[in-house]
Image: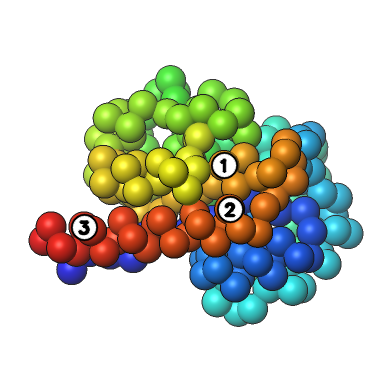
């Protein structure tokens, strides 16, 4: 049996897009708290997390967060996941109920990669795909969430070639930079589910 591919909609900034993602069947919502066109502050993140049903995970996304971030932000927001570059997670004691997921970037040393991880390009949110052949090798070593340049048009092919545990989309479901499109979100989720069906038939 082909496993269900998890779907994360990242860079969500408004309540209506939270609603669209949940309605479409997303498994997780990403809230960016580092400088980005998709950045939200702690108060906004808290309001958006409060809208999520229990079956949709909240993911706080950072890169090189400031000192005290875990104590000052994660402890208050209590997200299901904190996603950040792996060096950001080293030595951190996370609040109860929050798990860390490391971002592994294309070109990084992947010798010790295992467990849960996000795999994406050198810079987040650029809309560029990673090398799917290399990603497919890494996907066999843990629960990879494939990111980088995914769209409703190419995610089926990405799933077929990489076989990731999950997929992560941001710019690929936007109508303009930083502004999500509800229709594109529904199309993306539908494309993932079609890909699952196609893989099921192959087996």
Q: Secondary structure at mark 2?
A: helix
Residue at point 50%, 35% (across, down): 148
Residues packed near mark 3 inside 10 Å, few (<14), some (14 to 19) or many (20 plus):
some
In the picture provided, is 108 more to the left or to the right than 89? left
Structural crowding at the residue carrying mark 1, measured as other residues with C-alpha within 10 Å and reported as few (<14), some (14–19) or many (≥20): many
Check disc 3 and report the residue beneath it: 199
Secondary structure under the numbered disc 1 in the rendered image: helix
Question: Gap in Å between the C-alphas at discs 3 and 1?
Answer: 23 Å
Q: Earlier in the sequence, mark 3 or mark 1?
A: 1
Residue at 44%, 44% in the rendered image: 153
Callouts 2 and 1 close, C-beta under 8 Å? yes
Please tell me which residue lies in front, 94 or 142. Answer: 142
Instruction: Tell me where residue 183 appears, x and y as whole percent.
Output: 61, 58
Dividing the picture into quarters, in which one does residue 72 lie?
bottom right
User: Residue 178, percent across and down?
Assistant: 74, 41
Residue at 15 percent of width and 63 percent of height: 201
Q: Nearer the viewer, mark 2 or mark 1?
A: 2
Determine whether label 2 and label 3 are within 8 Å by CB.
no
Question: Is residue 61 shown to the viewer in this render?
Answer: no
Residue most toward the left? Answer: 203
In-front residue for pair 180/66: 180
Quadrant containing the N terminus is: bottom left
Q: Quadrant of residue 68?
A: top right
- Residue 184 image label: 2
**Nearer the N terminus, badge 2 or badge 1?**
1
Q: Of the numbered discs in the image, which one, if any, rests on residue 172?
A: 1
As displayed, is residue 9 above or below residue 53? above
- Residue at the farthest right position: 43
Place of residue 53 in the rendered image (x, y in percent of width and height, measured from the top left): 64, 78
């Amino acid at each position: 049996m082909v496993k269900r591919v998890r779907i994360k909609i990242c860079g969500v900034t408004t309540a209506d897009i939270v609603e669209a993602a949940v309605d479409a069947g997303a498994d997780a919502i990403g809230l960016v708290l580092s400088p980005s066109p998709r950045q939200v502050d702690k108060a906004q993140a808290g309001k958006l997390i409060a809208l999520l049903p229990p079956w949709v995970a909240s993911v706080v996304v950072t890169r090189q967060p400031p000192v005290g971030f875990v104590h000052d932000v994660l402890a208050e927001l209590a997200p299901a996941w904190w996603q950040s570059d792996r060096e950001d997670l080293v030595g951190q004691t996370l609040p109860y109920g929050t798990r860390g997921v490391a971002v592994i970037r294309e070109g990084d040393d992947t010798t010790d990669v295992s467990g849960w991880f996000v795999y994406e390009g050198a810079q987040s949110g650029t809309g560029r795909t990673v090398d799917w052949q290399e990603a497919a090798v890494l996907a066999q070593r843990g629960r990879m969430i494939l990111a980088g340049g995914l769209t409703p048009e190419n995610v089926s092919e990405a799933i077929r070639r990489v076989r990731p545990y999950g997929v992560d989309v941001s710019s690929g479901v936007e109508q303009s930079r930083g502004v999500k499109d509800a229709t594109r979100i529904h199309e993306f989720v539908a494309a993932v589910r079609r890909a699952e069906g196609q893989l099921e038939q192959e087996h």
